[in-house]
Image (cartoon, grey):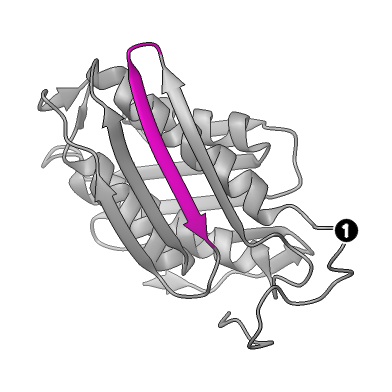
Amino acid sequence: MTLPGERLGRRVAERQRETAETVVAVRIDLDGSGRAEITTGIGFLDHLLTHLARHGGFDLRVHARGDRQIDEHHTTEDVAIVLGQAFLAALGDRAGIRRMGHSLMPMDDVLVLVAIDLSGRGKAVIDLPFARERLGELSTELIPHFLETFALEGRLNLHCRLLVPGNAHHQAEAAFKGLARALSDAVSFDPRRSGQLPSTKEYLEA
């Protein structure tokens, strides 16, 4: 069952999801200061989401409980679903924002490109291969899946490409730091737009 939640302010939203497999609650403030309160039961996922909050300048609270006696898939997937829904709700009508953002993120030996468009259309192209199967308790195959799910639920275009491979931990961190920076740029207000919708169509699906 998905609980609708309510938009709490201009750029703040909460969303919840409760199923037989997971219970997830997310609160996001797009105009925050990078504070994070993350408890998913999956240490490396907590680590990545903390990077998303800190480097995006978002205040983010994520509480999740899932059927980890099976594996971490359902919890990771449902956190991505609810985070995307909360992000979409907080974004609102997008009037006056820059809309697009990108980041070329180095992390020691690794280089990752992330580009986004808050277009109202969910699409992800992820090229982020890993040489390791796991990072802590998190299967590395779930990292691209998380990004794809977030993009679909948040109704945004997301491209993430590994340009220089290396340490798997660094690859994951660079992807989430890059996502954070790209999102931060895209949601920021452009003073030249004066509240106008950033589209020649004068329409963006919400």
Would you say residue 86 sits in the magenta stretch?
no
Give whichever of 11, 43 is nearer the camera: 11
Image-quadrant location for residue 47: top left
Position of residue 14 in the picture relative to residue 29 (left or right): left
Is residue 198 placed above or below 81 in the rendered structure? Answer: below
Q: Main secondary structure of the magenta part?
A: strand
Instruction: Label 1: state its secondary structure.
Output: loop
- Is residue 39 something one can see in this rendering? no
Give whichever of 82, 182 is nearer the camera: 182
Q: Residue at x 57, y 59 (%)?
A: 87
Image-quadrant location for residue 20: bottom left
Would you say residue 112 sits in the magenta stretch?
yes
Classify 10 Å Cα crowding around label 1: few (below 14), some (14-19), many (20 and above): few
Range of the magenta residues? Answer: 108-117
Instruction: Give coordinates of residue 191: x percent, y percent.
Output: 88, 58
Is residue 115 placed above or below 7 in the rendered structure? Answer: above
Q: Residue at x 35, y 32 (%)?
A: 45
Instruction: Give coordinates of residue 162: x percent, y percent.
Output: 28, 35
Position of residue 67 in the picture relative to residue 204 (left or right): left
Image-quadrant location for residue 149: bottom left
Position of residue 14 in the picture relative to residue 40 (left or right): right
Q: Quadrant of the N terminus?
A: bottom left
- Is residue 191 something one can see in this rendering? yes
Is residue 118 placed above or below 62 in the rendered structure? Answer: below
User: Which residue, given by chain and number where applicable, does mark 1 sit on?
Assistant: 191
Instruction: Give coordinates of residue 86: x percent, y percent.
Output: 55, 60
Amino acid type shown at disc 1: Pro
Q: Residue at x 21, y 25 (%)?
A: 137
Give whichever of 161, 66 is nearer the camera: 161
